[in-house]
Amino acid sequence: MISWISGDLVDFWQTNQKCFVLINCQGLGYEVQILEPFFLKLEEDLLSNKITLWIKHIKKEDSDLLFGFTSKDQKNFFIEILNIRGIGAQIGMGILNKFSINEIIDAINTQNKKLICSVPGIGQKMSERLILELKIKFKNELQIEKEKDEHEFEIKDPEINKIIEDLQLTLQSLNYRNKEIKNILPIIIKKVDLLDKEDNNFLFEKLLKLSINYLDKDSSNLAR
């Protein structure tokens, strides 16, 4: 069983949307399928010729397949995905090609079937099974994320905290997405100390205007 490989990069290529590297390790050439984001870094020549990969070794009747990852967490997550009925190695690689582990865990937590179904080869039923089984496997991680969200914007001043809560509700009513709102809230909260806090109505209006400016700016950048 091969757990990891460290050696010199000999070659890298892409075939049928699969990315590979050839690594020389003590005179032996190992062909390893890798994730696309890592492959793109190789294409951009951002990495040295020395490579270390965590390996999942899959033995078949007619072949030995090596799948390489830049972190142990990626490898372990890949193994968990393979333990789900109906999900093979290529779908597992497809999931990690498209999303980070945190993004997948967030999709599981929010039961975002549409996001999971955007991976080639995953349909509605498979996405439901994947979310259900991974939710059980990553129960601890999901609880940590939930606790983090609950305390992420905790503010000691009850009046300011109420203004921030009202601000979130107002932005939601203006059809801004929750993820966008959460992304800009830390910036807005930092601005509170710079503003006049004696007039709560003025403070709310000022923070709302700042929030909308940030949200609209982010949206325009994405549209470019």
Image: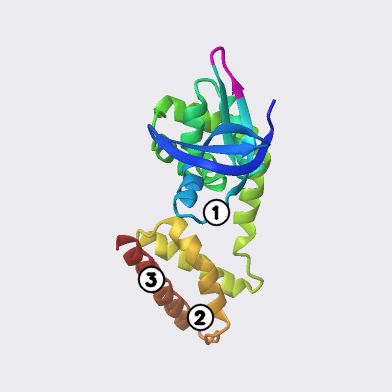
Query: How far across and down, in percent of the image, does residue 149 sit?
Result: 59, 55
Number of other residues with Cα within 10 Å of mark 3, as a class: few under 14, some 14 to 19, many 20 or more: some
Q: Which of the two residues, 110 or 10, is positioned nearer the viewer here?
A: 10
Q: Which residue is mark 2?
A: 200
Which residue, as the protein is rendered here, is positioned at the far top?
61
Q: Quadrant of residue 159?
A: bottom right
**Residue 116: percent from the left, percent from the top?**
44, 37
Q: Residue at x 51, y 85 (%)?
A: 199
Which residue type carries mark 3? Ile
Magenta residues?
58-62
Q: Is residue 50 magenta?
A: no
Between residue 141 and residue 208, name the one nearer to us.
141
- Please tell me whether mark 3 or mark 1 is closer to you in this view: 1
Q: Earlier in the sequence, mark 2 or mark 3?
A: 2
N-terminal label among 1 and 2:
1
Contact flag, marks 2 and 3 (Cβ < 8 Å): no
Find residue 115 and report its horizontal and vertical position in percent: 42, 41
Decide: is 147 above or below 186.
Answer: above
Residue at mark 3: 212
Q: Which residue is at a point 38% across and 73% down the rendered structure image?
A: 213
Question: Where does label 1 land, which residue?
Answer: 47
Q: Amino acid at mark 1?
A: Leu
